[in-house]
Amino acid sequence: MKLNTILLFVIILFINCSCSNTQKVAPKVVQGEINLREWDFEQDGMVTLSGKWEFYWNQLLSPEDFKNNELSPDYIHVPQGWGGGAEESKQYPDSGYATYRLLIHLPEQQSEDYRLLFTLLFSATKVYLNGELLTECGNVSKTAAENRAGILNFDEYFNQNNYPLGGEMELIIQQSSYNVKGAVYAGLISKVYVGT
């Protein structure tokens, strides 16, 4: 009986090892950038844009503002509310406004059509892609009186040739939140994906 149990264990272990998933580990966002130049979206799938994004508290910055390289960002982990998590050195108030920024370095040889997916955001939000307004929800504002919260669930394909930066995407997201209790719901609280 004991020999049968050991034999069964060895067989299960062998099957698990031989069937192990050899899927590539996706790169993470580091200091506001993610390098996907070696990523094959068709073979390897979509990438979660998780990691440390550039973060500008109490600033609603436009794409024009980033042409001047004199800005000094903080970095905040996405996905999570701007109230912060255990790994964050700073926590921000429940109410306020901010700008996030991410540079995405795309593969040289890839499909011309890309997909950007945001899953459920509860703050007023504006999303810019390479300097152009891609989508907005609610009314992003510096004051609670002018703020109008929204719920954004965005899944869109777009042609990279329509954006002038070639193999690089600049994603800028403005958000404001005054109506949601708890900063855990304010900010980029859900995963953001890019793919084809």
Image (cartoon, rainbow, N blue to C red):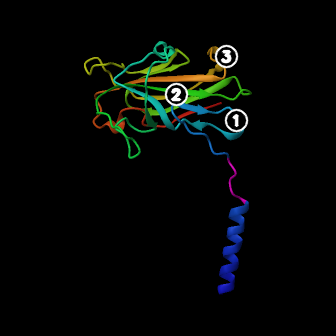
In the rendered structure, does residue 22 fall within the stretch colored magenta? yes
Please name the amino acid that badge 1 sits on.
Glu
Give the residue at x 56% y 34%: 193
Quadrant holding the C terminus: top right
Please name the amino acid that badge 2 sits on.
Leu
Q: Quadrant of residue 25?
A: top right
Segment tinted magenta in the rendering: 19-23
Q: Position of residue 176 (x, y in %)?
A: 35, 25
The Cα atoms of the two marked residues, 3 and 1, are separated by: 20 Å
Instruction: Give the residue number, with chain letter if any, for mark 3.
Output: 161
Height in image: 24 above or below 141? below
Instruction: State the SS at label 1.
Output: loop
Dot 3 or dot 2: first in sequence order is 2
Dot 3 or dot 1: first in sequence order is 1
Dot 2 or dot 1: first in sequence order is 1
Q: Position of residue 64 (x, y in %)?
A: 48, 12
Q: Quadrant of residue 75?
A: top left
Disc number at residue 47?
Answer: none
Give the residue at x 71% y 72%: 11
Height in image: 49 above or below 170? below
Instruction: Give the residue number, with chain letter if any, for mark 2.
Output: 102
Q: Label 1: how many residues lie within 10 Å, few (<14), some (14-19) or many (20+)?
A: few
In the rendered structure, does residue 80 fall within the stretch colored magenta? no
Q: Is residue 149 left or right of residue 126?
A: left
The Cα atoms of the two marked residues, 2 and 1, are separated by: 18 Å
Quadrant holding the N terminus: bottom right
Q: Nearer the viewer, residue 54 or 179?
A: 54
Q: Residue furthest left?
A: 145
Instruction: Give the residue number, with chain letter if any, for mark 1.
Output: 38
Give the residue at x 65% y 38%: 45
